[in-house]
Amino acid sequence: MKGKIVVAIVAIIAVIVFASFAVMYFSTYNKLVALNASVDEKWAQVEQELQRRYDLIPNIVSAARAYMAYEGSILQNVTALRSQWMNALRSGNMDAINNATAQMESGITGLIVTFEAYPDLRSSEVIQSLMITLEGTENRISTERMRFNEAVRDYNTAIQSFPANLWAAGWGFTVKSYFEAQVGSTEVPPLNF
């Protein structure tokens, strides 16, 4: 009788240990899936804001052309950079997207600096409205990049922490890259008048 009780207790303990392990295993997997989806969603938000900027550029170029015929080269450059960014986005190559994004930001910064250098142009309500919209878009992009990097941080931390680190690689979860500024993006772009 005593032997049966011991066997029953051992069996109950084994079931509890197995159930605890199973709960930990599946909840860890589900957490990693959710974090991975969050990273993908945050990157989609970055792309959405980049697309918003891409769609905004023709309006800025049209309005600016009406007020700044003599600055055609800067506007043409921004338009060309817009096309280059769209081609990079279609390719899906993260390095090409980052490079094209950095170049477009440099071109847009040059355009904004040009507007600021000519007070008569800034007084145009159309230009002011478009500049405010563009600056808001740039702020949104910056915010979404920050949120993307936060999601990547949370995901990378989760897959490298115990107990997820025991299974993450086997489940196909690997470290993701942060969005990083391109080399030279801290430099003020030169103005060519």
Image (spheres, grey):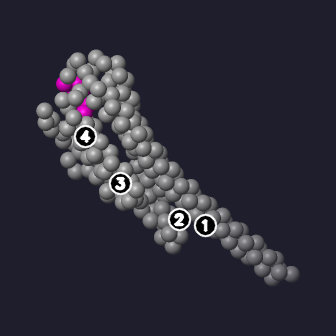
Q: CA distance from mark 2 to mark 4?
A: 54 Å
* Front tag of 4 and 1: 4
Q: First in sequence: mark 2 or mark 3?
A: 3
Question: What's the magenta bit mostly, secondary-structure-wise?
Answer: helix
Amino acid under label 3?
Asn
Q: Is residue 103 left or right of residue 168?
A: left
Relative to 28, residue 86 above or below: above
The local crowd at label 1, few if under 14, some if 14 to 19, many if 20 or more residues have their Cα within 10 Å, is: some
* Front tag of 2 and 4: 4
Q: Is residue 142 left or right of residue 77?
A: right
Q: First in sequence: mark 3 or mark 1?
A: 1
Q: State which region is magenta.
A: 111-117
Residue at label 3?
Answer: 87
Amino acid under label 1?
Tyr
As helix, strand or loop, the secondary structure at mark 2 comes to loop
Q: Is residue 81 magenta?
A: no
